Image: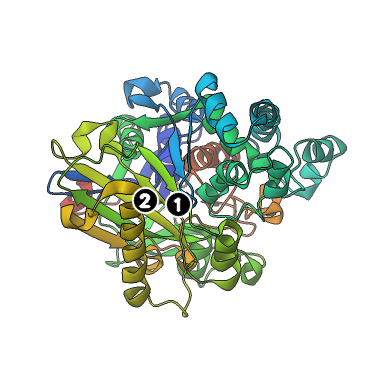
Amino acid sequence: MNRHRIAVVGAGVGGLAAAARLAHQGHEVHVFEKGSMPGGRCNRLSVDGFHFDTGPTLLLMPEVLEETFASIGRKASDYVELTRCDPNYRIHFRDGSDLTLGTELTAVQKELERLEPGSFKKYLEFLAVGQEQYQTSLERFVGRNFDGLGDFLTPSSLRKVFAIKAHKKMYPEVSRYFADERLRAALTFQTMYLGISPYESPAVYGLLPYTELAVGIWFPKGGMHAVPVALERAAKEDGAQFHYRTEVDQVVEENGRASAVVLKDGRRFDADLVLLNADLPWAYKNLLKGTSAVLPKAEKLRYTSSAYMMYLGVKRRYDGLLHHNVIFGGDYKGSFTDIFEKKKVPEDPSFYVNAPAHTDPSLAPKGKDALYVLVPVPHRTPDIDWKVEGPKVRRKVLDRLAQLGHGNLEKDIEVERTFTPDDYAITLNLERGSAFGLSHDFFQVGPFRPGNQDAHLKNLFFVGASTQPGTGLPMVMLSAKLTCERIDAFAAATQPKSDLPSFAPPALDAAA
């Protein structure tokens, strides 16, 4: 194996998983991160004993986490302790009704039949289709690299596309199983994990409710941030070096290759290859300016929604909440039209409330709650001033929670932080402040999605939500696997440079 020096830009989950794999293979890996800790979007906010995950709040497809650690000769359970959330979540509808869903079929049957008699049989049929979509997608589409459309447009692949209904829209497909609008909403809103409307999402994403309802929703002890911490630990054990509070300014091209990264402080790190975990469209625009690297059809790319976030440390435990809670506004379809087409905040927004201390009491002081509220909103647009719109959204959320019987939550707030699409753009370097990266409609997935190896600079690679296969914690870990396969092939065919200058970072870089 040829040992290469690799610069990884960004310590998000994708960059960490890739760094762990590459370090385990014996490469010299250096990870540069402008923040002070690992995680990227999967980070942590701690204030006065309240601990909040700032990004993802639930773990799906735990087998992907297990495979990631197995690939580096380790057991995931030695690094991350997972607990199954049971039930998964409770959904509150605008008419005052609710629905609690989980993996226990007898309980689910009672809940479904309560809203729509006869729906449980259809539910089992829906799950059977979701299982096929899940297995086929992993085997044929999200679990492999594509070298071009020719790999995708084969008779066998096209048969699978039609079999799993990847060419159809999710909401109409789900509607074939359920007549009650509440059940249709309950089994389609999961596309918002990808930042896409269920009315535009390919029906194949029926695999999302399947993974929740058949495999379950999981939560790591210590919060979701435990995942990037565990990946960092494993990478360090195999020799990867991490440089925090160290922002990369640009990638340098010399003789047709990405030869170095230049840091904001002017230092230069020379490398045999560069792996960018920064948001891909943002990286092309900002880190690769002046190089021959070009993002094809950049002006036509479509972006996901964003989020208005509230992190609330409150002085009492809200026993009426589950760990995961979904609150729908009054106009389900209209809210997606507002967010994705009209680019405005819905008048009656839907939102999600996460209360993780109900599963892991260490995340809040005794008897208190650390509440995380996510309100889906449009990505960044000049028509929305978040200094004006943010307080309006906050008021609507607090009023709705009061209507649901949770009292005057505002008087219980001890700690409050908010995060807007502007913050996603400025703090996390996400193009247009899109919280989930590039969109996942049919022509932006698989071989249609920006690739993980640049077409011009062959030693320049990408990992993360906006490259293949897509967004979400399991997908970015799969992205690391796919990108490392590309890097393996490149490293096996090229000799590392023997004259790279040494790199001696200042002492503060070593802090993690």
Residue 128, given in percent of the width and then of the height, sits at 69, 26
On the question of residue 280 being in view, the answer is yes
Identified by mark 1, the residue type is: Asn
Q: Residues within 10 Å of mark 1 (few under 14, many from 20)?
A: many
Residue nearer the viewer, 87 or 46: 87
Hey, what amino acid is under mark 2? Gly
State if disc 1 and disc 2 touch (CB < 8 Å): yes
Instruction: Return the x and y of residue 498 as percentages of the image width and height.
Output: 43, 45
Nearest to the observer: residue 397 or residue 504: 397
User: Vertically, is 375 above or below 64?
Assistant: below
Name the secondary structure under disc 1: loop
Q: Residue 20 at x, y = what percent? A: 40, 35
Q: Position of residue 54 (x, y in %)?
A: 33, 50
Q: Is residue 215 left or right of residue 179?
A: left
Mark toward the start of the polypeptide (2 vs 1): 2
Residue at the spot 33% in from the left edge and 20% down from the top edge = 78
Marks 2 and 1, how far apart at CA? 9 Å
Q: Is residue 57 above or below residue 383?
A: above
Circle 2 residue: 40
Q: Is residue 268 visible?
A: no
Q: 284 or 218: nearer the eye?
A: 218
> Which corner quadrant holds the C terminus?
top left
Q: How many neighbours does mark 2 have within 10 angstroms: few (below 14), some (14-19), or many (20 or more)?
A: many
Label annotation for residue 350: none
Q: Residue furthest bottom?
A: 383
Please say if 468 is above or below 127: below
Q: Nearer the viewer, residue 101 or 193?
A: 101
Tag 1 residue: 277
Q: Secondary structure at mark 2?
A: loop
> How many marks can you see?
2
Residue positioned most to the right: 155
Mark nearer the viewer, 2 or 1: 2
